Amino acid sequence: MISRFVASLLTISMLLCPAWASAAETTTLNQVSTSWVMTSIVFVMIMFIPGLALFYGGMLRSKNVLSICTQFFAFAGIVGLLWVMFIYSMVVDTTGMEEGVFNLASFVGGFDKAFMQGITDQTLMGDIPEFVTSVFGMTFAMITPAIVVGGYAERMKFSAMVLFVILWTTLVYAPMAHMVWGGPGAAMHNWGVLDFAGGTAVHINAGIAALVGALIIGKRKDWKTQSIAPHNLVYTFIGAGLLWAGWFGFNVGSALAANNSAGLILMNTQVAACAGIVGWMIVEKFLDTHISSLGLASGAIAGLVGITPAAAYVGVFGAAAIGLVTGIVCFYSVTRLKNILHIDDSLDVFALHGIGGIVGGLLTGVFASPTLGGNIEGLEFGTQFVAQMIGIVVTVAYSAAFTWGIFKVIDLTIGLRVSTEQEDKGLDISDHNERAYN
C-alpha cells in the first residue's frame, strides 16, 4: 500500500512544474514560445507595478499611498539584483537532486548558476533562451514580497522593509520556489503536490508571512478607534483590473508555450476570476444586503488566487467551481474571520492570498480528476488530497517559522515600527518627505 502511494505521487510529480524552472535543455529555439514568454514578462510587470501598487494604494489612507509605491520600486530593484546574484541559482540549481530522494537539494538549490555563470545568449531552457525564463521567474520573485507588505502597511519603517525583503526573499521565497519548481527530486515533487503557478510558493507563502508580520508589528494606532477607510477606491478598481489582465501572464506564461495547454490555462484563469466575482457578489448581497465595488474586485482576486495552483490540471467546470468556492470563502475571511481573530491585516493579504491559496490548493486535488473534467489520469482523491495537504502544511510551517525569525532579528537590531508621531503624519512624509496630493 505504501509503495503504491509513493509510486502514484512520483508519477504525478512528473507533470507538476512550469517549464521555466525545470525544463531539460534542448538545441532548437522556439520563436513563438519565446515571444509569448517575453510578452508574459511584460504582463506580470504591469500586474506588479502599477497593478498591485494601485490595488493596495487605493485602500490605504491618502497619507500613505506614495509609501507603498516607493516600497514596490525599491523591492523591484533589490530583488532583481539578488535574483541575478544568487536567488535564481537557489531556485533552479538541481545539483545533487534525485527523483524520489530527499536531501538538502530537495529544499534549496545550490550556487552553480550564481551571477548567471555558465549562461549565455545561446543557452536554452527547454526551447526558450534561459535569460528569458530567468527574467520570467524574476517577476514572480519581485511580486511575492510585495504582496506580503499589505498585511502590515502604514506602520513599518522603510529601512526595516528593505532588510526584510532581502532576508525573506533569500531565506523563505527562494527555498519555497525551489521546492515547488525545482523539478524531479524537489520536495513538493517528491510528495506529489499539484501546484502549477504558485499557490504555495507565492500565495500561501505571502499570506502566512503577512499574518505573522501583522501579529508581530501590532495593530495600527487608529485601528477600531477611528475610521480607516480606503482613500480612493477608483485606484483599487483600476489596480484590480490590471491584476486580472496581468494574471494571464502569470498563469498562461507559466506554460512556456503557445500550445493547447496554454489555451486551457487561459480559459481556466478567466472563468475562475468570473466565478470569484459571482461567488462574492451572491454572499455579500445575502449577508450584507449590498454589493460593493471593493467586494467585486476582491472576488476577482480571490478567484484568480484559487485557480493559480490548478490552472493546467482542471477543466472549465473545475475552474468555475474553484473560483466560486474561493470567492465565497474569502468573503468570510475578509469580513468575518479577521474580526474574530482580531488581527489588523491592513489589506487582507492573509484573508485573500493565504486562505484563497489554501482553498485553491485543496480543490486542485479534487477537480484535477478526469471524472470531474481534470486531466491527471489515475488521480485518486484520497492520495492526492493527502499530497495537497502535505504541501500546504509544509508551506505554512516553513513560512511562519522563518518569517517570525526574520521579523524578530530586524526588531532587535534596527526596529520594525515607525514612531507614533510618524504614523500620525503618514509614511509619505515621515519616510519619503513627499505628498501624493498637493
Image (spheres, rainbow, N blue to C red):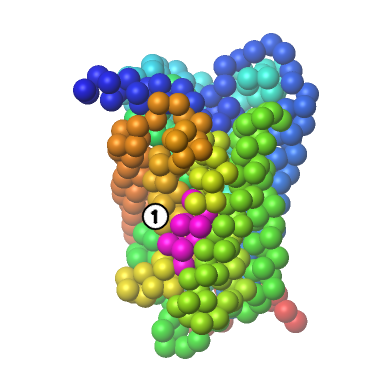
Residue at position x 57%, y 77% in the image: 291
What residue is shown at x 72% (from left), y 13% (from top)? Answer: 28
Q: Residue furthest bottom?
A: 226
Q: Residue 125, percent across and down?
A: 63, 21
User: Residue 138 in the image: x percent, y percent?
Assistant: 61, 39
Whether residue 69 appears in this view of the structure is no
From this view, report whether residue 125 is shown above or below residue 254.
Answer: above
Residue displayed at 43% across by 62% down? 329
Secondary-structure class at tag 1: helix
Based on the displayed image, in which of its 4 quarters is residue 20 positioned? top right
Q: Is residue 435 magenta?
A: no
Q: In front: 341, or 405?
A: 341
Image vertical order of residue 69 relative to residue 181, above or below = below
Q: Which residue is mark 1?
A: 208
Tell me the crowding category of disc 1: few under 14, some 14 to 19, or many 20 or more residues within 10 angstroms, Cα based: many
Left or right: residue 25 versus residue 242 is left
Q: Position of residue 275 (x, y in %)?
A: 57, 57
The stretch of residues the image draws in magenta is: 322-331
Where is residue 312 shown, x and y percent of the image?
55, 36
The one nearer the camera, 119 or 269, is 269
Amino acid type shown at disc 1: Ile
Q: Quadrant of residue 50?
A: bottom right
